[in-house]
Amino acid sequence: MKIIVCIKQVPDPEAPTAQFKIDEASKRLRPSKSVNPVANPFDMNAVEAAIQLKEAAGGKITVLSLGPESSADVLKQAVAMGADDAVRIDMDTAVPWNSFLTAHALSAAIRKIGQFDLVLCGRQAADTNAGQVGVGVAAVLGVSCVSFVSGIEPKNGKVEVERIADKGRELLEVGLPAVLTISNEINHPRFPTAMKLIAAGRQEIPSWTLGEIGFSVEKLLSEWPGLEEKKHFIPKPTTTCEFVEAETLEEAGEKLALRLRTEKVL
């Protein structure tokens, strides 16, 4: 099975909100210098899912990232976990990257890599939480897509996929090739050994320019209207407090349960 995993380098999502600001001009999230770049956690679930598929059915894993030179570090992390090959698409900083352009650029690189059975992406990126790139890649490549995947099993040249639905889980049989967006419920990414980290750290990660993958932003936007991002903002948290008044603890419990049910918490 030939598997391609798309991964992204993001600012550490565990950093305090106060360490992030929105650049109004570029509509981009700007972390402070103290916030380290890390691999998108959902993408690491996708890498682990790919490794488990390879262990079960054999095959080859190629990890792919669109990003600056520093994003080679997250590719090396995936190689240390068990990926076979890695490629970085050099991110032109002059391009106003968004989900639409990213999906098309990744798709161009996937075509350059060649035949594949599965493309795995994290269900969303931890910096934007948009969740649009994976399904966008499937649309550009013209293949099936299943989102919010929480389980994968190879089965007779296809894959049996469990996905998270609004009310429970769905079990689907998916023909190949396909794109799956992986949710964090699927697994716990492994920690590579020190020796594998050292070996991966010494590996040279090849990089492709946009021209080398046959991708032109100008040509694409001349043919398609693209995506215009109107505004980025950090929501301000709001809290409310409501007291449950009652004569007894039993009455308070009943009223609390009724209130939670009304709010659809229970």
Image (cartoon, rainbow, N blue to C red):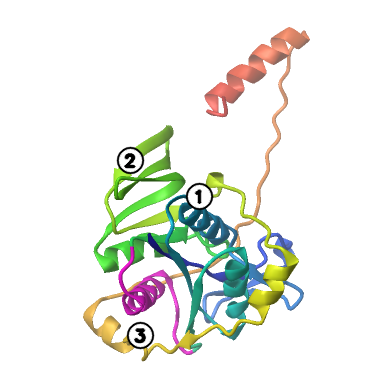
- Label 3 with label 2: CB-CB less than 8 Å: no
Q: Amino acid at mark 3?
A: Ile
Q: Is residue 106 magenta?
A: yes
Q: Quadrant of the C terminus?
A: top right
Of pointers 3 and 2, the one earlier in the residue sequence: 2
Residue 200 image-quadrant placement: bottom right
Q: Quadrant of residue 167?
A: top left
How far apart are the alpha carbons under marks 1 and 3?
A: 29 Å
Q: Secondary structure at mark 2?
A: strand
Whether residue 187 can be seen here: yes
Residue at (71, 21) in percent of width and height: 244
Question: On screen, 60 above or below 148?
Answer: below
Name the side, left or right, on which 217 lies relative to 69: left
Q: CA distance from mark 1 to mark 2?
A: 15 Å
| Residue that carries the numbered disc 3 in the rendered image | 213
The numbered disc on residue 183 is 1
What residue is disc 2 on? Answer: 172
Local crowd size for mark 1, using a 10 Å CA cut-off: few (<14), some (14–19), many (≥20): many
